Amino acid sequence: MTLPPISGEVGLDTTDFKTAIASMNRELRVIESGFRASAAALGDWTHSATGLENRAETLTEKLEIQGRKVEALRGEYERVAEEKGENSRAAQQLDQAKQRNGNFEQNGGGAQADGKGAGGFGG
């Protein structure tokens, strides 16, 4: 009796990673919503010290979350690169996302402060 040859590709479980990124994206949206609600109560927040302090706090919180996203991307890249190899498609996609988010971190927030810098892995 001859058995058929075994073939296929081993898939990586990225569920925890994607869940963590989605959770961080939700946190970013909640922070921004909270700021917008308080800004609406202040009127033109750009002309009050309280409004500017609130915005600075909001941006600081968002920057911290983006930093966590960068670390999550780094960790996932290292895991995928180790399991599938640095030249695998999955590792290359994570490396590109990591670089985009790393640029965000180096530029102090830049245009990705909306939480969409997860390179297709987030919200």
Image (cartoon, grey):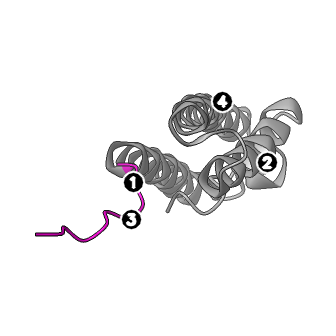
* Few, some or many residues within 10 Å of mark 1 (<14, 14–19, 20+): few
User: What distance separates the C-alpha of mark 3 from that of mark 1?
Assistant: 7 Å
In the displayed structure, 119 sits above or below 98; it is below
Q: Amino acid at mark 1?
A: Val
Q: Residue at x 54, y 57 (%)?
A: 121
The residue to which callout 3 is attached is 8
Numbered disc in front, either 2 or 3? 3
Q: Is 63 in the magenta?
A: no
The residue to which callout 2 is attached is 100
The residue to which callout 4 is attached is 60
**Residue 51 at what x, y percent from top left?**
67, 41
SS at mark 2?
helix
User: What distance separates the C-alpha of mark 2 from that of mark 3?
Assistant: 32 Å
**Residue 69 at what x, y percent from top left?**
57, 37
Q: Is residue 38 visible?
A: yes
Magenta-highlighted residues = 1-14
Q: Earlier in the sequence, mark 1 or mark 4?
A: 1
* Few, some or many residues within 10 Å of mark 2 (<14, 14–19, 20+): some
Numbered disc in front, either 1 or 4? 1
Q: Earlier in the sequence, mark 1 or mark 2?
A: 1
- Dominant secondary structure of the magenta stretch? loop
> Is residue 61 found left or right of 109 in the rendered image?
left
* Few, some or many residues within 10 Å of mark 3 (<14, 14–19, 20+): few
